[in-house]
Image: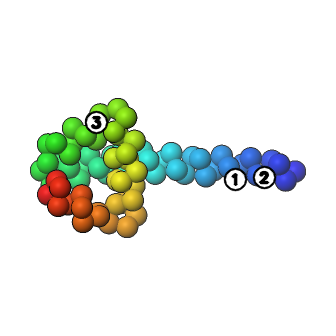
Amino acid sequence: MFRAIKDSFGMGVFFALWALLLLGDLYWLYSSIQIGSFFMFVLGLLGPIAFLTGLIGGFALLFGWPDFILSIFG
């Protein structure tokens, strides 16, 4: 029984992180359009870099944009 609960919890955490990564990447693309940065938009579409931009976008979705991102792309 505890194994089933542990597996369900692990799957829930995995799904939540995956959803945050996906929403973070979409938020990255949306913010790049709002800022007007074409380079930021292109970085959000590139394959391996999209993972990193998704993490930063997820952080920004929860806590706001870090200053270094706005100074680079803004």
Q: Which mark is residue 29?
A: none
User: Residue 58 placed where, x, y %?
Assistant: 40, 55
| Marks 1 & 2, CB-CB < 8 Å contact | yes
For residue 10, above or below residue 60: above
Instruction: Kindly report the distance in space between the C-alpha atoms of the residues bearing marks 1 and 3.
Output: 31 Å
Pointer 2: residues within 10 angstroms few (<14), some, or many (20+)? Answer: few
Q: Which mark is residue 9?
A: 1
* Residue 27 in view of the camera: yes
Residue to which mark 3 is pinned: 45
Left/right of residue 70 with respect to residue 19 in the rendered view: left
Amino acid found under the numbered disc labelled 1: Phe
User: Residue 12 placed where, x, y %?
Assistant: 63, 50
Amino acid found under the numbered disc labelled 2: Ile
Left/right of residue 9 with respect to residue 5 in the rendered view: left
Residue to which mark 2 is pinned: 5
| Label 1 or label 3, whichever comes before in sequence order | 1
Which residue is found at the position 16% from the left and 53% from the top?
73
User: Residue 13 placed where, x, y %?
Assistant: 61, 52
On the image, which quarter does residue 43 sit in?
A: top left
| Label 3 or label 2, whichever comes before in sequence order | 2
For residue 35, above or below residue 48: below
| Marks 1 & 3, CB-CB < 8 Å contact | no
Pick the residue in front: 74 or 1: 74
Amino acid found under the numbered disc labelled 3: Leu
Which residue is found at the position 14% from the left and 48% from the top?
37
Q: Secondary structure at mark 3?
A: helix
Instruction: Kindly report the distance in space between the C-alpha atoms of the residues bearing marks 1 and 2.
Output: 6 Å
* Residue 23 in view of the camera: no
